[in-house]
Image (cartoon, grey):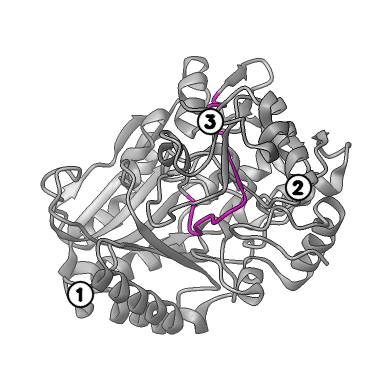
């Protein structure tokens, strides 16, 4: 990779071990590109950090030059293009150290959940990941983390024991419930507003296998399956985790047959208990509507991607979400009108999903955090693929119509990781309660008074 240290204002970055690149350098485009191709970054400078020392050097330079800073590991959550400023790419920092005695993992800033699964599996352990193990651990966890097994075990941030973080003053800090507890609070659910995390220590689960997969019905049976699923969610134990999804899949090779190019209604299942108990619990769903594809089976925890079958290749996406208080019959009808068969097979949203919340996610964390989704019983999110300008306009209209229609059933809040493109301050604040948002603003003023970390889902300093 090309390294540029000859520009006077970059001289202080000459100690960085990884590449230091500017627009026009041969490796620049590769260094700034993340998973979500809708966010095309054009920073003035990008560094490829190889360890905490590189991040300390970069943050001290940013403070001295008053240069705004953004961070990217995988770019799964990149909904906002980074223009100008400094981008710190942590994708080289992938080390994962597992301690099977304490059942913990020390995870570097750029590691993906797939790295954690690979390191933990030989010990019969697993991390509390989301629907794609290709996502980065740190960015996911800073937003709270919405695990596939969340009803059984809570949010990923609930399991974090400590962080190593570089604050905008260039200091490398260790924070946990006893050391700088306010910083520890802000990092668990407050996203990256207080510093750049270089590593975290988290608990692992003694869960080598689970019972999971998807029950797929033709899309015309969406109403029958959805109403059965909603009734079913009111009776199941906390350990049963599930989501109802409307899928309009394109005819591309990355999607396996027979799902390719189809219109489907699906219930995704994840059950950490005995397979026989899980099979008995989901029997009413299998009987609710004609099943075309059934992938629910016992699987290694490392095969978690097979449950939700999210895309594994980079693509340009528009996502959004809303936390729901409940799903009364009127809400079900509204959802079907917006995304079900009545909306047509050419509806522009690739995926619209309702996740069952509650269970362990409704209980307070053992250590206070900034997550504000514990009062939600369901969660709706959507994804559209921005293939061309006409498609982008249709996706934007469909997204706005969906969430406007579902707003009466919502808590008024979103989840920061899946919020979508952040708007003005009022829009960004929807990821938290007013009380938590004000507390985050005061913490921002403490740790980042110059608002260097102002990209993405940023909080304004008090």
Viewer can see residue 348: no
Nearer to us of marks 3 and 1 is 3
Mark linked to residue 65:
2
Residue 282, image x, y percentages: 33, 50
Disc 2 secondary structure class = helix
Q: Earlier in the sequence, mark 1 or mark 2?
A: 2
Left or right for 31, reference 291 = right
What residue sits 43% from the left and 53% below the top?
A: 40
The range drawn in magenta is 77-94
Q: Which residue is mark 1?
A: 341
Q: Quadrant of the C terminus?
A: bottom right
Image height of 347 relative to 19, above or below = below
Magenta highlight on residue 304: no
Q: Which residue is mark 3?
A: 111
Residue 38, image x, y percentages: 39, 57
Instruction: Tally the marks.
Output: 3
Image height of 98 relative to 140, above or below = above
Quadrant housing residue 164: top right
Q: Contact, CB < 8 Å: mark 3 with mark 1? A: no
């Amino acid at each position: 990779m090309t390294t540029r240290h000859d520009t006077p204002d970059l001289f202080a970055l000459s100690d960085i071990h990884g590449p230091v690149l500017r627009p026009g350098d041969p490796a620049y485009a590769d260094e700034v590109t993340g998973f979500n191709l809708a966010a095309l970054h054009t920073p003035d400078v990008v560094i490829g950090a190889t360890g905490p020392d590189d991040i300390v050097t970069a943050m001290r330079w940013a403070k001295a030059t008053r240069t705004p800073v953004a961070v990217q590991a995988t770019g799964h959550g990149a909904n906002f293009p980074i223009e100008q400023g400094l981008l710190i790419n942590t994708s080289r920092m992938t080390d994962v150290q597992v301690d099977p005695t304490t059942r913990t993992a020390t995870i570097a800033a750029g590691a993906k959940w797939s790295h954690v699964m690979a390191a933990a599996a030989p010990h019969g352990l697993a991390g509390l990941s989301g629907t794609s193990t290709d996502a980065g651990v740190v960015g996911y966890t800073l937003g709270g983390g919405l695990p596939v097994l969340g009803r059984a075990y809570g949010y990923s941030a609930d399991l974090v024991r400590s962080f190593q973080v570089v604050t905008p003053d260039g200091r490398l800090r260790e924070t946990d419930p006893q050391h700088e507890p306010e910083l520890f609070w802000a990092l668990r659910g407050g996203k990256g507003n207080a510093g750049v995390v270089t590593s975290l220590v988290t608990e692992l689960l003694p869960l080598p296998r689970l019972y999971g997969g998807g029950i797929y019905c033709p899309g015309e049976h969406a109403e029958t399956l959805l109403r059965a699923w909603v009734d079913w969610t009111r009776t199941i134990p906390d350990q049963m985790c599930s989501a109802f999804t409307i899928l309009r899949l394109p005819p591309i090779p990355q999607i396996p047959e027979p799902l390719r190019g189809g219109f489907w209604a699906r219930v995704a299942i994840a059950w950490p208990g005995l397979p026989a108990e899980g099979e008995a619990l989901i029997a009413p769903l299998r009987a609710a509507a004609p099943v075309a594809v059934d992938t629910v089976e016992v699987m290694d925890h490392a095969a978690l991607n097979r449950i939700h079958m999210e895309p594994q290749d980079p693509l340009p996406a528009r996502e959004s979400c809303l936390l729901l208080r409940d799903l009364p019959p009127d809400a079900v009808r509204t959802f079907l009108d917006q995304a079900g068969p009545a909306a047509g097979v050419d509806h522009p949203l690739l995926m619209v999903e309702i996740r069952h919340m509650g269970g362990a996610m409704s209980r307070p964390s053992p250590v206070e955090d900034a997550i504000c989704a514990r009062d939600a019983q369901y969660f709706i999110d959507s994804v559209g693929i921005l293939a061309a300008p006409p498609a982008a306009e249709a996706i934007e209209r469909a997204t706005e119509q969906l969430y406007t229609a579902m707003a009466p059933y919502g808590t008024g809040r979103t989840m920061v990781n899946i919020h979508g493109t952040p708007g003005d301050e009022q829009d960004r604040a929807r990821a938290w309660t007013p009380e938590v948002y004000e507390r985050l603003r005061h913490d921002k003023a403490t740790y980042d008074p110059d608002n260097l970390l102002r990209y993405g889902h940023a909080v304004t300093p008090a």
